[in-house]
Amino acid sequence: MRIHRSMQALTLVTTVAALTACGSMGGRHQPEGNDAVVAVQWDSGPLDRSYQGERTQMDARHQQEIANPRAGESSDQAKQRQSAESQDLDKRYAQGKASHAQTLPPSDQKHDDHGDTPSR
């Protein structure tokens, strides 16, 4: 009986020692230096206001163009142009959000926003 208890105690001590040794090697190493994690939250308000301002101006201009069609531009051409302008604005807004911009990125499209002949 004495030998049996001694074997149990020895087994327990060996198991604890092995687990302690393994635990000290298991990824708990802290890198040396002054590493810090900084959480920064982006404020989308300026971008949202920039988008909303351009959207409001564009929608008002489109309504004016519907009421007073441009000379030489068919209804279908106007709808296509206005749709392209709207899609471009939405694309720029998505790009601005993705890059955490403060204002809308410039358009890479040359829209005929002022009644001039289209620039291509």
Image (cartoon, helix red, strand yellow):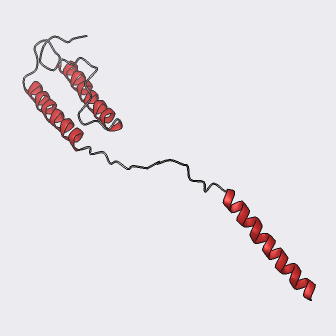
Please say if 11 is above or below 35. below
Nearer to us in this view, 111 or 79:
111
Quarter of the image holding residue 3? Answer: bottom right
Q: Is residue 76 left or right of residue 36?
A: left
In what quadrant of the picture does the C terminus appear? top left
Nearer to us in this view, 63 or 50:
50
Quarter of the image holding residue 8? Answer: bottom right
Tell me residue 2's x, y (percent).
91, 88
Please say if 107 is above or below 46. above
Q: In this view, does 9 lie to the left or right of 88?
A: right
Residue extending farthest bottom: 1
Please say if 3 is above or below 36. below
In what quadrant of the picture does the N terminus appear? bottom right
Nearer to us in this view, 103 or 80:
103
Tell me residue 76's x, y (percent).
22, 21
Residue at screen point 26% across, 43% down:
44
Residue extending farthest front: 33
Tell me residue 85's x, y (percent).
23, 25
Q: In this view, does 18 lie to the left or right of 25?
A: right
Quarter of the image holding residue 111? Answer: top left
